[in-house]
Amino acid sequence: MKKEQVVNCQFSVWYPLFKKLTIKSLILPLPQNVIDYLLDDGTLVVSGSSENSTQRSQTNNSDSEEEDDIQWSDDETTTVATAPEFPEFNSKVQEAINALGGRVFPKLNWSAPRDANWIALNSSLQCQSLSDIFLLFKSSDFITHDLTQPFLQCSDDSPDPGINYELVLRKWSELIPGGEFRCFVKENKLIGISQRDYTQHYQHISKQEASISSSILLFFKNHIQHQFPDEDFVLDVYRDSMGRVWLIDFNPFGEVTDSLLFTWEELTSGNSLTDSEDTALQESPAFRYTTSEVTVQPSPCLSYRIPRDFLDLSTGEDAYKLIDFLKLKKGQQEEESEDEAEAEPHVAST
């Protein structure tokens, strides 16, 4: 995977080329002070529209009038964390949200905060204000990766290209997970299609396997093939209930992109991904989906819902944390042994 391929998968690069094939979106430059705020490792304090916050607090206050009589400490040593305000940027964001119908799906140049939906209301990535967006972005490792290591797994040693970071706001659309598919393109040939939400079994996919595969292949040949700047890439599409295919996103052809029901070893091997000996079928893209409830798998985003320290301990990725944990356990065991020794009854000798 080359750095140029990553650059070409930025939303602002491909959106003008395929605007008529995808969801209506608006792109706003991301100011440096907002980037600094998103990368701040301090306490999560969400900034955004004061009006929006006031409206939400009114609902909470109406149900907690009893708290008005509580006298809080006036200790001078207590510090109150306050989030920075971005009035000009907030105004532009709110204007864009309103222009898109009042509800949007946010992302940066490449990634959406899919790993942070657990922290949002109803576990949804739907946003109505800048504060909603900040809450997701500051809780997302995917967003941090975009901002800090977009070229991490690139093979070329050339200097990192300059990146102008952007906030992408997409008109909110209720997409059924069973209609989302990821397509792998190598040398401008569609070689594989994978069910995007492979953690669930959708009966309609097995029943409509042939029509789904053919409609996606036709969409690719008519609208995408030889139109994208690179010949190796990954694209996400959505097939609606009417059988129409929509473009959702482009991703680099490499390990930075989730290969879902394929492996990157087989995708890059150059060998046919189909088991059939029929030459015609070998020329068609391999189509993989979850075939039954037995093969349902846990969501890969579940690991982002627990403290990172716990995850590092369980996988052994951070040796220092593991050493500290073992020292702590050893200390606790020694203290328990001492307490038990002191508590043992003394038998008087005669």
Image (cartoon, grey):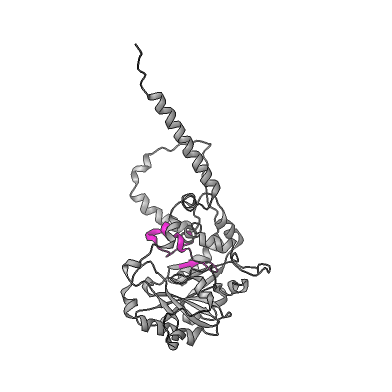
Pick the quarter of the image with the C terminus: top left
Q: Position of residue 341 (x, y in %)?
A: 41, 26
The residue lying toward the viewer, choosing from 153 and 57, is 153
Q: Position of residue 292 (x, y in %)?
A: 32, 70
Above or below, comparing residue 30 to residue 25 in the picture? above
The single residue placed furthest to the top in the displayed view is 350
Span colored in magenta: 105-131
Q: Tag count in the figure?
A: 0
Above or below, comparing residue 79 to residue 201 in the picture? above
Magenta residue check for 217: no
Q: Is residue 136 left or right of residue 232?
A: left
Above or below, comparing residue 161 to residue 40 in the picture? below
Pick the quarter of the image with the N terminus: bottom right
The residue lying toward the viewer, choosing from 9 and 134, is 9
Q: Residue at x 55, y 52 (%)?
A: 41
Q: Position of residue 85 (x, y in %)?
A: 54, 56
**Could you tell me if residue 68 is visible in this image?**
yes
The single residue placed furthest to the front in the displayed view is 350
Q: Is residue 238 left or right of residue 257?
A: left
Magenta residue check for 117: yes
Q: Residue at x 62, y 69 (%)?
A: 155
Q: Position of residue 174 (x, y in %)?
A: 38, 71
**Could you tell me if residue 176 is visible in this image?**
no
